[in-house]
Image (cartoon, helix red, strand yellow):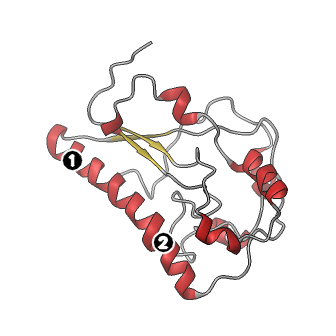
Amino acid sequence: MKFNFSKWVIFHVPHDSTHIPYDIRNQFILSTESLQKEFVKMTDFWTLALYSNGIPVEQTVVSPISRLVVDVERFADDSLESMSGIGMGVIYQKTHDLKTLRRELSAAERSRLLREYYYPHHYTLTRKVKDALSRYGRALIIDLHSFSSEQLPYEGPLLKDRPEVCIGTDPYHTS
């Protein structure tokens, strides 16, 4: 089935990938088996495939790397990111069950991750939003996610009753 989406709608797929570049795999202390288990808990598997039939490529922004490398939906500044307090800021230090995910990174390693993955992703997303605003006078970003049917340890007490669908905004991102 093909859908006809307005050209001012941008589909954001931030957590579908399990790719960890070879040259940064050494940052992670988990065994390959444990890392695979972490992917199962933390990846929004198949979100791109589920929704991509009918979404024009030019209206999508997809992160090519795992959120375990860099979570493009977090603030780059950990002082602004509430999840950084539990080791899950823009660059995760903890697993879904709050165990150590990776070794301590140097400032240079952190800067490199942001420069190579976070900022290019946001540049693309911002460019597509600005283009929609200039061409159509509006833009709507739809984040494509999946959620575990059971609460994960890092989520705390907030998500006791799991919604089947999550639709929302927040004051920081929505004028």
In the rendered image, the vertical position of residue 172 relative to residue 5, given as above or below: below
What residue is rendered at 27% in x and 54% in y?
Answer: 127
Residue for point 44% across, 69% down: 116
Does 19 appear above or below 103?
Answer: above
Q: Is residue 91 visible?
A: no
First of labels 2, 1 by sequence position: 2
Nearest to viewer (mark 2 / mark 1): 2
* Rendered position, 86 above or below 132: below
Outermost residue to the bottom: 107
Q: Residue at x 15, y 41 (%)?
A: 135
Q: Amino acid at mark 2?
A: Leu
Q: Circle 1: is it few (<14), some (14-19), or many (20+) Cα within 10 Å?
A: some
Q: Residue at x 76, y 54 (%)?
A: 155
Closer to the camera in the image, 62 or 11: 62
Q: Which residue is mark 2?
A: 114
Is 18 on the left or on the right of 13, as rendered?
right
Who is closer to the viewer here, 24 or 120?
Answer: 24
Q: Position of residue 158 (x, y in %)?
A: 75, 50
The kind of secondary structure element at disc 1 is helix
> Which mark, residue 131?
1
Q: Amino acid at mark 1?
A: Asp
Quadrant assignment, res 70 = bottom right
Q: Residue furthest top?
A: 1
Dot 2 falls on a residue whose secondary structure is helix
